[in-house]
Image (cartoon, rainbow, N blue to C red):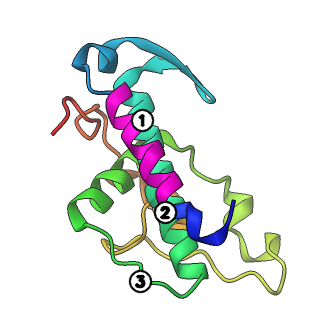
Amino acid sequence: MPDDGWLSAYQRARARATTAWADDAKLDALVEVPWGKVPGRIAVSGYVQEILTHGWDLARATGQPTELDPELAAWVLAVAQRILPPEPAVARSPSARSSRSPPTPALTPSSPPGSAAGRDGPSSHRSDTDSHLPRSRS
């Protein structure tokens, strides 16, 4: 794809996704996604997490603005903390990292969703309910 074709390709894919999920009944139907068979709303939240997290990573890696909608970023971080398994303690230990690996950052309200800080945050930030999962489209 030519370098100037990415934006229009993304816009077309976004339009297809919006159309595909326009029917609220699809949000309750079971769908097959790479991580298993889940209700549609869980699949959508997984894709929102992926797009936001990797979009943030890509923007940061290429020196572009990384400002996120604070409400969406907080929601994605809360979902990630609930669904992603914590890293094993050995992965967080300084001796388990190479000398070139930066230390794992601490969880803060400004931690990017899906970042190492978001995955390593204290369990007290994890929710015992599905209250952070979407219930209806806006």
Lateral position of residue 50 relative to residue 25, left or right: right
Lateral position of residue 81 relative to residue 4, left or right: left
Callout 1 crowding tier (Cα within 10 Å): few <14, some 14–19, many ≥20: few
Is 54 situated above or below 94?
above
| Among the 4 quarters of the image, the one containing residue 27 | top left
Residue 120 seen: no
The picture places residue 7, in percent across and down from the top left corner, at 49, 63
| Among the 4 quarters of the image, the one containing residue 33 | top right
Residue 41 seen: yes
The picture places residue 106, in percent across and down from the top left corner, at 47, 75
Q: Is residue 5 magenta?
A: no
Residue sitting at x 84%, y 79%: 98
Q: Which residues are magenta?
A: 8-20
The picture places residue 92, in percent across and down from the top left corner, at 67, 66
Q: Find disc 3 in the rendering and name its residue.
A: 65
Callout 3 crowding tier (Cα within 10 Å): few <14, some 14–19, many ≥20: few
| Callout in the foreground (2, 3) | 2
Q: Is residue 13 magenta?
A: yes
Cα–Cα span, label 2 and label 3: 16 Å
| Secondary element at image label 3 | loop
**Label 1 close to label 2 by CB (< 8 Å):** no
The picture places residue 136, in percent across and down from the top left corner, at 18, 30
Lateral position of residue 35 relative to residue 48, left or right: right
Disc 1 residue type (three-letter): Arg
Q: Residue furthest right?
A: 98
Label of residue 7 in the image? 2
**What predominant SS class does the magenta segment belong to?**
helix
Observer-nearest residue: 32 or 104?
32
| Secondary element at image label 2 | helix
